[in-house]
Amino acid sequence: MDILISGLLLGGTYVLIALGLNLQYGVARIMNLANGEMLVLGALASFWMFVSSAVSPLLTLILVIPLAFIGNWLIYRLLLIPLVRRARHQGQLEVDSILATFGMSFVLVGIMVALHGEYFTYSFLARPITILQSTVALNRLVAFGFAVLIGALLVLWLNYSRAGMAVRAVAVDPASARLVGINVEKISALAFAVGGSVAAVAGVLISTFITLDASVGVIFTMKALIIIIMGGVGDVRGAIVAALILGLVETLVATLIDPGLTLASAYLIFLLVLLFKPQGLFGRAQT
Amino acid sequence: MKSADIRALVTAVVCIVLAALVPFVFNGYWLSIALTAMMYIALSTSWALFSGPTHYISLASGAFFGVGGYLVATGMSDYNQSFWLMMFVAAIAATVLAGLIGLATLRLSGVYFVIFTLGLAEMIRNLVSWVQNNFLGSRGLYVLTDFTEAHIYWMLLTVASAVFIFGWLVERSRLGFALKIIGNDETVARHVGINTAWTKVVLFMSTGFFAALVGAIIAPRYSYIEPNLVFSPELSFLVVIMALLGGTHRLWGPLLGVIPFTLIWEAISIWIPNFTTLFLGIAFLTIVYFVPNGFVGLLEKTRGSRGVKAGS
Amino acid sequence: MNTATNNPGLTRSGKPAARIASGRTLLEVQSVSKAFGGLLAVDDLSFSVREGEVLGIVGPNGSGKTTVMNLVSGVFSVSSGEIYLDGQDLTAVPAHKIARAGVARTFQLVKVLPGLSTIDNVIAGAVFARRRRWGSEAKSHARNLLDRVGLGGRQTQPVSSLTYIDQKRVELARALAGDPQILLLDEWLAGLNPSELQTGMELVQSLSDEGRTIILVEHVMDAIRSLCDRCIVVNSGRLIAEGTPSAVLSDPAVIAAYLGEEHD
Ligand SMILES: Nc1ncnc2c1ncn2[C@@H]1O[C@H](COP(=O)(O)OP(=O)(O)OP(=O)(O)O)[C@@H](O)[C@H]1O
Ligand SMILES: [Mg+2]
């Protein structure tokens, strides 16, 4: 039961990470391997605000969201659009964006290491509370609550706002979206920026209950990617289920076998997905 | 055509002989740098043979390298096997591993492949540490041989030469032609009768083979081996950067990237070690935005534009 | 069965009528369906092609013609039904094996290998397919084929510098290079100007005169009339008519299917 609950709570934040990356990959067609660094930046901001001025991470969110939005928007405009424009086909854009975002990821890690090379440790709401007969830290619960809230807002935005509609249209088919008068470049930039802010938000939330450091981003990128592939690119429902599965399995392996094997367990899931369901849990065979 | 082949052959032989003389001219520090460069020449050239034509970015070098180093260490330390036997075993093991990974991932899009290889070294390291701590007892592994740096250097030179010969043969074979077609259009490749999955897997296995061989040969240099040392994700990135910087569409392209980059990397690691990560990032960005076709591309471009000027 | 041989007015010059009648069945498509999500692009379609025959497939835009080609050549696997080539089951076989069995095709949206020279594009078709050639043999074979499609002397040119029409010729030469048992041409004559069309039709005619088996997907009805021995009409993935081109094209159901579509 303990495992189930902490697995689900962890999965909740994974959902958020995967939603962010899904927006960037599914809509802007950029496999952003610097996504994890966005998350770590969020965590670093949260840590700083808390340690230097005792600002609650939940308040830091108000600052982090617009900053991450603008930062990611600029990255897309300045660094990624040139790649989109010069790409002669999707394959080339794929390779270029992988290399470019690797570059950004290393640059960000390099900068963060220079800023703060140690662990981001602080203690926020580290009180145990009991739900369903098992004890969890309050910060995990709060983070989970916020993750659900922000995830829900995101889904509502995608489904019911004009901009969200346009985002989904571009995700399905950029060429047709262009035909109905959608500015694909602008919408892609928007999706990329929103995706980046979501990652930063996830970082703030995660930093309340996991100790991060500057170089840990790549682990989160990996997990987000595994979740997206498991859930199916662009599939929100799939991402949620996949994130919860990953959270559960990792917690299971970490508590029952060895915490050193969480990555290996993520890989095992990844491998099974690739072998048996490469189009995602709910994907149809072939397109 | 024929005379160009002969000229290439002669150049290659001269280069190999000159490279073989390095330990007689340099020793100590510069020999160790030459050794590192030779290691990356083998790794990057072999990497480019697969990733150049197919555009699948492999980050698995670190994992295969680690398999090589670790198997040699554990074989010699725990099971009293000879270095040579373990080197052979390691290369075969990594080839099989590469084959399995390839079969699982290379049928799918390039993104899946990069992601899978991205965490591979780290994952295998975790697994190996876990097995070692829980079942084998966490003793250190010693690789004690009487190899000198020069010996290791010559062995690496042999591997690098083998990579070049292999690449030269592939380029002239149906396999190489198939690979070129796959890189151009995979659908067409299938429709002219190419088993695309198999072709990619075979080449990927060759990168596994050579990387493990290099890892095995390097192991005696460290003499004390632990998983953290040999399963290095950083190595995978360095291999990619050096190959791309040199240019992957020519067999000798990666060579042009390895030599300057090894020197710069060495300098940075000594003088500003805190900036290595930042520098890796800058190197990636530089390649994507300024030298997308590597130094070879730049060379060919300047030569090409000069040719046009001369012609007009 | 209604074939070209029953209608002497349509038997084309050069081809012995008797051979078509006696030709054995080469390709057999049996109640094949293909669904894309909810869309049934091919719906319980059956037809067969005999050796040496030119079969036309016509139908309005989006009726499933290209999808049929994709199923035969193995781009997709069928949702149900079976496909046989010369008695060999190709239903669940991957595309490269289908190509080796002797199915070659061109693509509606031309697909050349942009990084290769013109002649290498053709050699690509010769090395791995049914009849395998390599080295100088492949080269001279490719050279002959380029001459044949009217691109002699353009061998070393990068294929990306060729015009769209010439790229289509390269694609045809590539398809021929492996000596296929059956050739699938997906709107290979589309987008040609009248004189190019004339040359193109003569080329296809000459391939047929050699006894090659061809499936021709076309919107150009003149080409269907003059090149095909037999023709099937699909609409919304279903077979709606089958027979000689002239009979089929005057069928009221076919005219109804095309109504509102331009046709010549
Ligand atoms: N890969 C695919 N995924 C989803 N739907 C597809 C796919 N390929 C084809 N379709 C759909 O199947 C139907 C048949 O398409 P197809 O391309 O076979 O028509 P066609 O007869 O070749 O048309 P045209 O004359 O315009 O070439 C169309 O509705 C098309 O949108
Ligand atoms: Mg079509």
Image: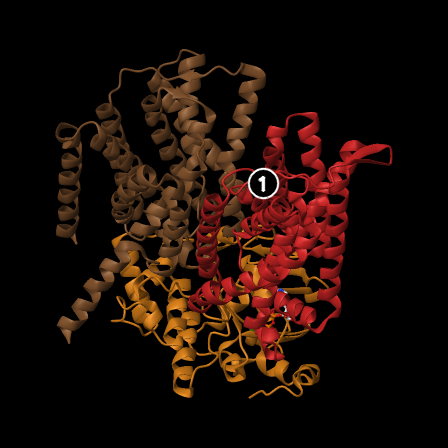
The residue lying at 63 percent from left, 48 percent from top is: A53
Vertical placement of B142 versus A114: above or below? above
- Name the residue carrying label 1: A120
For the residue labelled by badge 1, is the local secondary structure a helix, a strand or a loop? loop
Callout 1: few (<14), some (14-19), or many (20+) C-alpha neighbours within 10 Å? many
- Left or right: residue B283 versus residue A287 is left
For this orientation, the residue located farthest to the front is: A53
The image position of residue B248, as x and y in percent, is 32, 51
For this orientation, the residue located farthest to the right is: A132
C80 and A234: which one is in front? A234
Q: Quadrant of residue A195?
A: bottom right
Chain letter for brown?
A: B
Q: Quadrant of residue B272?
A: top left
B310 and B283: which one is in front? B283
State whether residue C25 appears in this view.
no
Read off the chain for label 1.
Answer: A
Chain letter for red?
A: A
Chain letter for orange?
A: C
